[in-house]
Amino acid sequence: MITDATGPDRSRFDRVFDVCVIGAGPAGITLARRLAARGLEVALMEGGGRYVSGESQDLYVGEIVGLDYFDLEVVRLRSFGGCSTHWTGRCRTLDPVDFTPLPQRPLAWPIGPEAIEPHAAEATRILDMEADREGPDLPLIQAEERFRNVQFRHSPADYPEHEPTRFGEKYYDEIAATPGITAGLNANLVDLRLDDDLATVTGAVFRSYEPGDPGFAVRARAYALCAGGFETPRLLLNFTSQKPMGIGNDHDLVGRHFCEHPTIQVADVLFDRPQMIQEQNLAPTRAFMDREEVLNFVLRVTWLDRGARSPYEALKYAGKCATPLAERLSERITGHAPKCRWRGWGEYGTQADPERHPTGFVWLITEQALNRDSRVTLAETRDAMGLRRLRFDWRLTDLDYRTMKTAMLALGAHFAETGTGRIRIDDWLMEEDPQLPRIAKSGKYGRYMSGAYHQMCTLRMDADPRAGVVDGNCRVHGTENLYIGGSSAFATPGFANPTYTIVKMALRLGDHLADALGEGARPVAVVPGSAG
């Protein structure tokens, strides 16, 4: 059953649920379905409507004070289905090394991959993929052990013929028909109420967008906050009526350790011959990471299969790229910069005869170092619900830049040794003190991204409450019944896109809560196709 909280009748929420799940993205929907399949009564509360609206997105507006980033109301979607509405469907499991402490990254997960991998098959079905996990590393000829030739999967299995799985589209009717789930749309969480000992959540207070709405409370035996890597810490930091530093923030960790996947098109490739495959993904071996003391990363090497320009057009284009001065003059005259890669006759050859001079480019996606000062805090301005808005301070460390530079230099050596070709690394990365380029719509850095819309680790998992906000079961340290779902609970980010891991962790959390609350669970009918 799905109810719009904007309406006057909220009687459906006037009872005690087993679990109140807050946020209807991949984590929240997966968790609610799992709990209902295990016989629990669930309230699934979403701050947006069925579809994105300007009114709901405005609550995501915030301040950016650190590294340049995308507009905060663009990278997140506040509607039923959450950010699955704009994800690209790229999937891969985390590597075993991502769970392991390293000298260069001593903090790690308090659980191992074996804790979430039993849920791989179910997550695969939810995301409409084929095999339960990606295939093994592909063969790779290399003179020195540096890389693994890794594989990714896509949601759905027939991508790009069909769009990635959109949770709002796939599961809306099922959620509406599931007796064990009562869903509320346009229900914005504005407070969590605690008992006198400040150790147990006794109610979650919601408000709709109606002016003057006094709000309503949802009571449950347990609560799971699945609002995303930005919004979940923002909410907990705002809830200061009983705990001045915010809920879960006894050790000043809520919102810290923010991680993205720095994602940059960082080099061009001049291949020695046309490539047999369109894309190759190279990740470091564990030996390489240990030897170079770097983080995990993946190099996405893409062959640019394109047609030839006429000799006249190729010569004209090469002229724009003859010198840096010619490039700047062309940009000034035309208003946009030519995509100069090789200059002079090298540029002419790639334009006039790409079969003999095949080209490509390299995307670098890296694990980000855990850094306390990379964080989400609160601005002084307030949103329509009266909560303080987000203040985002994204920071990278010397280790992050050293990982990027080491990865690219290793790729250049690998290409030279194997006769693959040569690369031209962008100038900014080779500087003594590199800084991630700003995002730009056009001009010299127009092709850059800075991140991948992945917000992680702001409530990171750790057995020690002085190092993490949640424990190995995603329970907030210092509370009895408050849990966190989604990538904010990641202990480290790895380089893999997070949605697949988010879904597996939500299934695991659902089973944990069902086991913990089992004595009071009430069997209910489950509609066909729900998780079981």
Image (cartoon, rainbow, N blue to C red):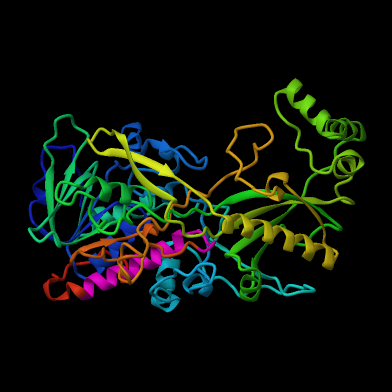
Q: Looking at the image, how many numbered discs can be counted on the residues?
A: 0
Report whether 406 appears left or right of 380.
right
**Which stretch did the figure color magenta?**
494-515
Name the foreground residue: 48 vs 164: 48
Image spot of residue 181 (x, y percent): 21, 58
Residue 48 horizontal side relative to residue 18, left or right: right
Name the quadrant of the C terminus: bottom left
For the point 24% across and 66% down, which residue is it?
Answer: 35
Q: Main secondary structure of the magenta part?
A: helix
Q: Residue at x 51, y 55 (%)?
A: 89
Q: Which residue is outermost to the top?
A: 333
Q: Is residue 354 left or right of residue 223?
A: right
**Residue 494 versus residue 7: which sits nearer the camera?**
494
Name the residue located 46 percent from the left edge and 37 percent from the top edge: 71
Instruction: Give the quarter of the image for residue 482.
Output: bottom left
x, y percent for residue 160 = 58, 53
* Residue 511 lies in the magenta-colored region: yes
Q: Position of residue 240 (x, y in %)?
A: 19, 47
Q: Where is residue 170, by image quadrant?
A: bottom left
**Can see residue 279?**
no
